[in-house]
Amino acid sequence: MSALGVVILAPVLAAMLVLLLRQWAGVVAAGGALIALLASMWLLYGAVSGAPAALVLPGLPRMPLLLEAGSLTAILSLMVAVVAFFVLIFAVGYMAHDREKPRFFATMLMFVAAMQLLVLSADWITLLAAWELIGVSSYLLIGFWHGKPGVAGAATRAFIYTRSADLGLYIGAFLLIGLAGTSEISASLATTGTPAMVAGLLLLVAAMGKSAQVPLNDWLQRAMAGPTPVSALLHSATLVAAGAILLIRIAPMLPAQTLVVVGLVGGVTTVVTGLIALGEKDLKRLLAASTSSQYGLMLLAIGAGAWVVALLHLLAHAAIKSGLFLGAGVFQHARGSTLMDDIAGAGRAQPRVFAGFTLAALALAGLPPLAGFFSKDAIIAAALASPGAAWLLPLGLAGTVLTGAYMARALMQLWQPTSIAAPDDKNLRWMGWGLAGVVALAVGLGAAFPALEALLGEKMVVSTLAMMLGLGAAAIGLLLGWFVAPRVLLGPLYAWAQNGFAIAGGMDALVLRPAMAMARACNRVEAGIYAGVLGFGRAMMHLGRGTRLTDEAGIDGTIFGFVRATIRSGKRARLLQSAMIHRSLALTITATGILAIGLFAAPLFY
Amino acid sequence: MAIELIVTLIMAAGLFGTGVYGALSQTNLVMIMMGIELILAAGLLNLVAFWRYLHPEAIEAQMFVLIVMTVMAVEMAVGFGVAIARFRSRGSVEMEEARELKG
Amino acid sequence: MSVQLVFLLAFGLAAVWFGIVVFRTHSMVRSALALLFSQTAIGAMFLVMQTEFLGVLQIMMMATEMSIMAIFMVMFMMDPGGLGEMDMKHQRKLSLGAGILAFAGATALALLADWGPIATEIPDAGEQVRLLGFELLGRSMLIFESAGLTILTAMIAATAMAVQAANRPEPAAPDRGPDRGKQHGH
């Protein structure tokens, strides 16, 4: 039994124990996470000393299931284990009064185990299985308080958004398996040329769904309906990180054309969701939008060709964002709400928690010597050095300014004078320890970066200009956020940003490239799976009509035509959903028939 | 000449057509399930015929038959679960009356 | 005309005929019995095609399945003997068209395709079972295991679904249905 097995099985066994005992759920869960943490430290030690642990399990014929802790995967596994451990410690206090503790901790542990499996998998089939598992467990966790209004809907929305984007992962992974003839990830990365580009784009779609990139960013903010420890885990080290991790792992394969798209998606996301975060009225939703924005920066770094930098920012962000969420959880605990107006002054009442929150916030904004400073400057340096610097650099800098601005705004709101005293609660101690752990990481992680680079055998680009630019942008952002109200700062964009750049409004104009994916997602969300099949066909016809409009009316015409077509096809698709089982069956059989005819006719066109 | 194979395939085609007709035309949930059973049975027949007459050396074909049988059993179990739940709450398994899914 | 062909034709026609009878009788119990006969005829075709294990398995499984189905029919329809007249069809033309089209398409494929040479030598029954055992517990272990797991999941899910309905408070009126749907939907 190698340490690999322990990393994955310890949380699973702890989850079972939690369900069996139904007592001391939190302590058992934290114990399981601690064992996994020690085991993953051992994995990293193995990777450092040049003997990476690997496990081959019999799977499909000629495609065994592989687990491997190379230097990259061991670092990621350690990150997941560390964040999970502190979040679970925090949750012991946070969930103290919840009646369904066993269910909560068991699902959390399952989530962590699935994420470890995803991180450590060395073949596509295990990765797909783990990808599904984290999808399911995040659905269960977001919908944990399913009795409350709106929560079930939020969970469903998160599930459907990530689910429809997952199709990209399936097609991309099978494409790579088919081309390489093996399901090993490392072997399939040797793919080059057009197949690599197509597969890269397909995997990008999957990563966009999971990492909540524009235009699939909406679900993440709604997912705030779940308990706060869930958000902390989900945003920093598990579900949302899965998308970025996928791209980091396949980054060596991506050709230049795909990198351009990755960088563009990331750059647009970091700015758009940064604006959303600035206009947000709820602290947790602000943090959620900021997560999208930070993952946008990581994608931007990958697009600039520096995946190591993306990895470093992922690590720094994991520590910082879990710290921010845990802090927000304490304030939520004190005030019973996360609305900006309700938590005004909550920080002044609890200065020690506020200090931790502030450190994390400043680290995210990128002030030295906190962890975010090093990774963010490395991103800007990478953008500066890349061939696409002309558009990557402004987007990256804008993202940095926005980061500073929204973090300063949150800090200012928390530091308002207040008369409400902090509640005296012994559960606060657990929460405090969890928070202290991740904040210490957020502060000190930067010191470990050179060692990590040496381990991965890559060197970050260092540039004084980038450092100056980054620091300047962060300072400007912080000052703007502290002194200028977001209503003034955003100007005409304010109302727009507040409803998340609603899709039918103007989002389409900003993101023409992934618009197809969005049309598909809209159809699915609106009309359900059955109608979606036919509705997509209709959308395609409308798209054809929209394209004809282009010739007549130019680019403007396309954009508006597309918006109209999307709305129209959504309306039509809704008609299809008559809720009559036999109609649905008839539709299914028709679609199957069309598919069959297509398959048989395919050789004729070969 | 592959006359045995063709005869078997035509019989399977007959079962398939009957199953499609049944699944589409019946109003009762259980009857719809019967139609689906017929469709799956036609698939089984094809699998066995292909194994017997084309590739008797590929024993995986028989494994596929077992998997399809699993699917049939699963379909029955879940279908009856739905039918019982529906019958208990609505007193009927007529699908003409099932419109709660209307979005 | 070989003996095998004669038996295939006979059992095949029986299977199709009973398949049609399923949707033509006016009693659901009779439908279930007709389906049982149809599936048994298919099992007999398996036997004719020298796959003894699968043939016996098919007949045994379907016999149990169909008797369960017949019991459910009696339970839902309160019509043990099929004495009352009933008509439970809709979208007739569409269904008939789809059925005929499906039959015609599949038949055309069967007739038009070039099937190549027919195998004459096949392993005997004992050898087949031995090979199948090695296949299931060797190379295809994962698939076999997941099939078993799927059945287990389905059993638990079906039971949970059927039991939960009993514990839930009965809906006051049928028109409460849509409300409940909305609560859980988006």
Image (spheres, helix red, strand yellow):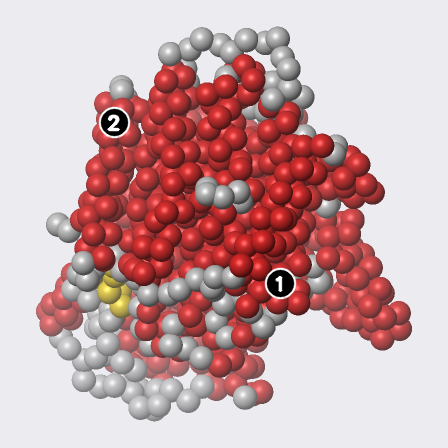
User: Which of disc 2 and disc 1 is earlier in sequence?
Assistant: 2
Residue type highlighted by circle 2: Val
Percent coordinates x, y for residue A183 in the rendering: 32, 69
Residue type highlighted by circle 1: Leu
- Closer to the camera in the image, A128 or A40: A40
Q: Are marks 1 and 2 on the same chain?
A: yes
**Which residue, given by chain and number where applicable, does mark 2 sit on?**
A28
* Camera-side mark, 1 or 2: 1
The crowd level at tag 2 (other Cα within 10 Å; few <14, some 14-19, many 20+) is many
* Farthest-out residue, right: A552
Tell me: residue A430, above or below residue A423.
Answer: below
- Closer to the camera in the image, A181 or B33: A181
Percent coordinates x, y for residue A19 in the rendering: 28, 28
Count how many numbered circles sit on residues in the image. 2
Q: Chain of mark 1?
A: A
Residue occupying image coordinates x 73% and y 45%: A502
Percent coordinates x, y for residue A391 in the rendering: 66, 64
Query: Based on the displayed image, in which of its 4 quarters is residue A266 positioned?
Result: bottom right
Find residue C102 and name its label.
none
Query: Based on the displayed image, in which of its 4 quarters is residue A57 positioned?
Result: bottom left
Percent coordinates x, y for residue A573 in the rendering: 70, 53
- Closer to the camera in the image, A111 or C152: A111
Q: CA distance from mark 1 to mark 2?
A: 46 Å
Position of residue A545 in the picture relative to residue A93 (left or right): right
From this viewpoint, is residue A217 visible?
no
Residue occupying image coordinates x 11% and y 72%: C127
Tell me: residue C79, above or below residue A542.
Answer: above
Residue occupying image coordinates x 35% and y 80%: B5
Find residue A392 and name its label.
1
Q: Quadrant of the C terminus of chain A?
A: bottom right
Q: Chain of mark 2?
A: A
The crowd level at tag 1 (other Cα within 10 Å; few <14, some 14-19, many 20+) is many
